[in-house]
Amino acid sequence: MNKALLKTINVAIVSVYLIFLAGSVVRMTGSGMGCPDWPKCFGYYIPPTSEDQLEWKANTDFHKGVIIIHDEALYVAKSDFITKEEFSYDNWEAYTKHEYAEFNVYHTYTEYINRLSSVVAGFVFLVLLWKVTFDKNKIRGVALLSYVAFAGMLFEAWLGKVVVDSFLTPYIITIHMIGGLLIIGLLLRAKFLLNSKNLSFSYKYNKTFHWLLLSLLLMMIIQILLGTQVRQFVDEQVKLHGFEQKEFRLLDPNFNFYFHRSFTIVVVLISSFIFWLNQKYSLGYKQTRWILAFLFFEAFTGILMYYVHFPFGTQAIHLLSGAILFGVLLYSLFVSYRLKRFNS
């Protein structure tokens, strides 16, 4: 087993989860439009720190592509030039992809950090591609999975632009999140292939455990999809009542919310039974403890969001817990399927 490659894959997995965390903080703070353009932020590689930097001024140098807020609208400099005593529309073109024209330094840098997390992950993936390409002890499938995961990252980067250009359209955000989960799945599969030779010494196969694990993963996928529908409902309430009116976010929720909430009880019961089976038959799945732990965080934050009106941090923990739980279940199922083949 190539330990260096395995460590790189682990770092890549962590980097994707950090993107999930950064993205959830953006949503939690309402910072999604902190940078109204992409990939730059107000036309800068390093965003402005005050609204004064985004105002038109006489006798001032402006560079091509920088954005200002003028008459409550965004304008982009057509070229490098020095302003005269009066504003001239000849030097500017209106930013037409959306009509959002506000500056909040807190929101801007929250979104900027989110984008930086994607850049860091991109460099990690480049290192991963280098290693899988020139690895002397190649394991079948690892390189292909890594290449596809990198292609997924490129797609996700483009989709991030679409999210901003579309003024945070909910269904595009949902596709964006699901894409991230698919990338995690690809990386976990690559990690599993690197670790697969040692599985028979660490785990035992149990038929009931296997099928319950599969059922639980499918239930979690359903829960995640339902959760995206609930989030879209919350987004609509935020647009209707404003970001600060948290008590209205789950006012008169639809059927998806109640099903999502009630279905959690079934998920908890099956997870508890899986944990019990693992302990009783000494199956070796330490992951069952993580399943219960992250399920607790997800359920508890869900309760807080509904009854305490979205306390700070609960949305981020809720989303990240669900994403990690998905990964733990998927990897456990990879292990169980391999053991099933050994015992068939």
Image (cartoon, rainbow, N blue to C red):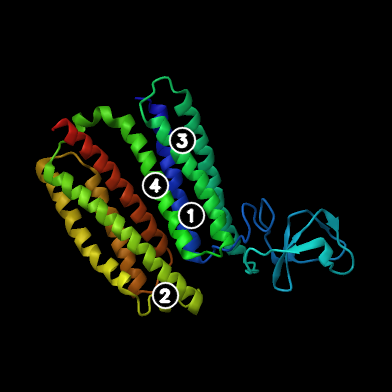
Looking at the picture, which amino acid does disc 3 mark?
Answer: Tyr
Q: Residues within 10 Å of mark 1 (few under 14, many from 20)?
A: many
| Residue drawn at 17 percent across, 59 percent down | 269
Residue annotated with mark 4? 182
Looking at the picture, which amino acid does disc 4 mark?
Answer: Leu
Residue annotated with mark 2? 249
Q: Quadrant of the N terminus?
A: top left
Residue annotated with mark 1? 22
Looking at the picture, which amino acid does disc 2 mark?
Answer: Arg
Measured as percent of width and height from the top left, residue 33 is found at: 58, 63
**Is any part of residue 278 visible from this angle?**
yes
**Is any part of residue 114 visible from this angle?**
no
Measured as percent of width and height from the top left, residue 265 is found at: 21, 64
Residue 337, above or below 111: above
Q: Name the outermost residue toward the right.
A: 85
Residue annotated with mark 3? 147
Query: Which label's residue is closer to the chain start, 4 or 1?
Result: 1
Query: Which label's residue is closer to the chain start, 4 or 2?
Result: 4
Residue 112, above or below 312: above
| Residue drawn at 12 percent across, 41 percent down | 206
Looking at the picture, which amino acid does disc 1 mark?
Answer: Ala
